[in-house]
Amino acid sequence: MENLVRDIRFAVRSILRKPLFAVIAVVSLALGIGANTAIFSLINEIFLRPLPIEQPDRVMAIFTTDERAGGQSPSSHLNWRDLREQNEVFGEVAGYDFAGISIQTGGEATVGPALLVSGNYFDTLGVRPYRGRFFLSEEDSTPGAHPVAVLHYGYWSEELGADESVVGRTITINGQPFTVVGVAAPGFHGLNVGFEPRLWLPMAMHRAIRTDPALNWYDERRGLFLFGFGRLRPGVDQATAQANVELIGARLQREYPDDNLGRSFEVQPIAETAVFNRAAVMAGTTLLMATVGLVLLIACANVANLLLARATERRKEIAIRLAMGIGRARLIRQLLTESLLVSLCGGALGLVVAFVSRDSLLGILGAVPGGPNLQLDLSIDGRVLLFTLGIALATGLLFGLLPAIQSSSPHLVAAIKDQGDLTLGPGRRFSARNALVVLQLALSVVALVGAGLFLRSLSAARAVDLGFETDRLAVISFDVGLSGYTREQGEQFFREARDRIASLPGVETTALSQTGPLQGTILRSVFLEGQNPEERTFVQVSGVGEGYFETLGVEIEAGRSFTDADRAGSVPVVIVNREMANRYWPGQEAVGQRFHFFGMEPVEVVGVAEVVTYQNPGEEPAPFAYLPVQQYYVTNTNVLARTAGDPSTVLLAAQAELRRMDPSLVINATTADALVENALAGQLNTALFLGILGGIALLLAAIGIYGVMSYTVRRRTRELGIRVALGASGSEVLGMVLRQGLALAGIGLAVGLVAALAVTRLMSQLLFVSPADPVAFAGTMVILALVALAACLAPALRASSVSPIIVLRYE
């Protein structure tokens, strides 16, 4: 212990003698360690932090599986209820459903996310209220009888000012009064990472919350929307539970073959289901972690080069200490202590970098505006601290070991006389410092190529033909169901809203649509006429109004568009896209064909529209069906308005008109161009983040090249002076130094090119361009070559101006 304290004191004095070295090394490491800590805090929040429930390992998520659709889906309410009553493996089975609600607590109404939950939801999870109580079993037994609510702690504290008298108060939800009975504990958000509801409501109140009849599937055995979970009974394991739910699934198939054919149940630990689209999120975070890992390796190589240069300056001191009898092992330990002290300082500063940058990271990686209310807590907890400490120690060993080994074995006589070069022995042309610079450049190529590919991918995605015209298109969204409108009132409101917006100055055409451009769709089962019911398939569906295709600039390739005559009471009709026509009626005329959606009467195809992009740029063509809104009523709608000029001016006027019609209406107004940018937000965020990291890698690589060339010129000053004295011109010396530096850069670029070609293949699923895109690779090579040239130029110019008289005089 005494020796360790002595080594630490010696290391501190040694570092303080060269403060510039310490600052550069610590800052370089802080950037690398801070970036790794920031990304690890994201991984910690998404994958590692345990759910705040009692014994989470005993809670199983329950999914529906379908032999035809594949994958895992939520369950229907009726199947979930049967499983809850018939299972023999769960002590409790609970469930929840996502919903959007309108909330009014005295001021203007706002829209927010909520969860409809079974009465035993909180008890099954083993959580306790912060204020008041949770739901009673009878409050979820009679539909519509108990309008009560439990508030989220964040909503209570931030929106309601942590009002201690909130329990017993009334708040207005979707135009109906609800009584607050409790407040959830801090940190409890439910079972889905990143989703933060404003409140929880009893499932029995679904008719007040699911006001859109087209989206209220509580009485439909086929409607898959309910997320079930159960707590295992003592002594029951996952395999036993799986066998039992499969038996129940088989029984429900026999009892309800029309609805449950091919369907069963599957259980999975709740911790493995907390992240939606887990595989894609894991792929994205792996990419980010690999990138910040590259930056940290570059920083390590940089600091190792600094240590080698510093060791060269200390070679006389080290040689004297060795000559006086200090053991080599003790010397290596002292030098490693210095390295570890520098890395720990870099780790401490890295924690500050991670803490300061967490809001920026959330901004870069945040959810698309208008999407779900994702909330991520990137706080620095014990797990993040241990990760940072571990990576700091590993980093100190990584960059400190090679310089320590080389520094502890100099040629004693030459070193004491201050002759020779620690890094260059006789006949050695490629030093450890050069090897580290090659490594830096190779890693920089990989990092910059990755950033370049995502920038190119973003550009390619923006150039994708969406199939409709986005310029001068305003999108005004609202949901009359959140204000308690009946169907008759809603239909009247839609007509009047469209007419008022159509009469605004600058508006050319208008149309109604259930979903706006790139805002998602509904998937429904389709049965073709004369087809075996077991052969049903799924298509995307949306309700649209008269003038929809004309407003979006979508061509009707066959048949006709919808008209005002396609209303309730008339022949049910549908327009399909070309992909659906070709897939379901190959070689036939689609117009005139008939089919029906599950639970609906047959519809007749009256038109075929061209294929457009429905959700994400670059998606594969998919079958799509359009239903007339006058025959297919939904409470949420979008008024699409094609304008003569800038659509943003129309948005303000449209919102004012709608508020005059109903001041309580919650309105979201945007442009189609903004929706496209939102759809590309993931590509933009990734490109931005990788670009920042690539820039850091480029800067560190430039510093590394400059350091090596400056060191080389300084060590060869006498040799260069002799060359000039013997007749070498300044330009010859300049060329010689530049060739050496650029040869080093060329090796690094070549190694990096090979590595990048191998690594970028792993990104193919995330890109709109080829992972071997020549523009991204060529651009990276040019940028790095120019940076390498600039980094070599200053030392080369200094070498070309060496005065032989001054050099030889002082030698």
Image: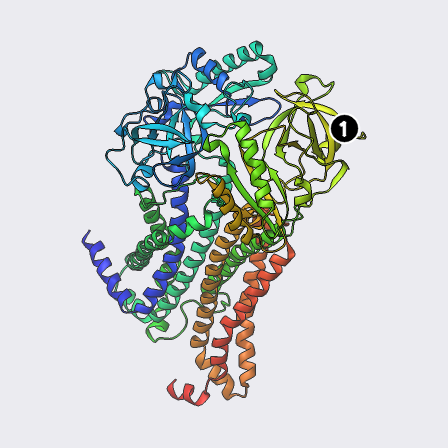
Dot 1 alpha-carbon crowd within 10 angstroms: few under 14, some 14 to 19, many 20 or more: some
**Residue 82 in the image: above or below residue 648:** above
Q: Where is residue 266 in the image (x, y as percent from the top left)?
A: 50, 21
220 up-or-down from 658: above or below:
above
* Residue ID for mark 1: 585
Question: Could one spot residue 518 in this view of the protein?
Answer: no
Of helix, strand and loop, which one carries label 1?
loop
Query: Camera-side residue: 329 or 789?
Result: 789
The type of residue carrying mark 1 is: Trp
How far across and down, in percent of the image, does residue 669 sit? 51, 46
Q: Position of residue 462 (x, y in %)?
A: 61, 51
- Asked where in the image residue 214 lies, by quadrant, the reply is top right
The quarter of the image holding the C terminus is: bottom left
746 w.r.t. 501: above or below: below
Q: Is residue 406 visible?
A: yes
Viewer-proximal residue among 147 and 50 = 147
Residue nearest the viewer, comparing 571 with 12: 571
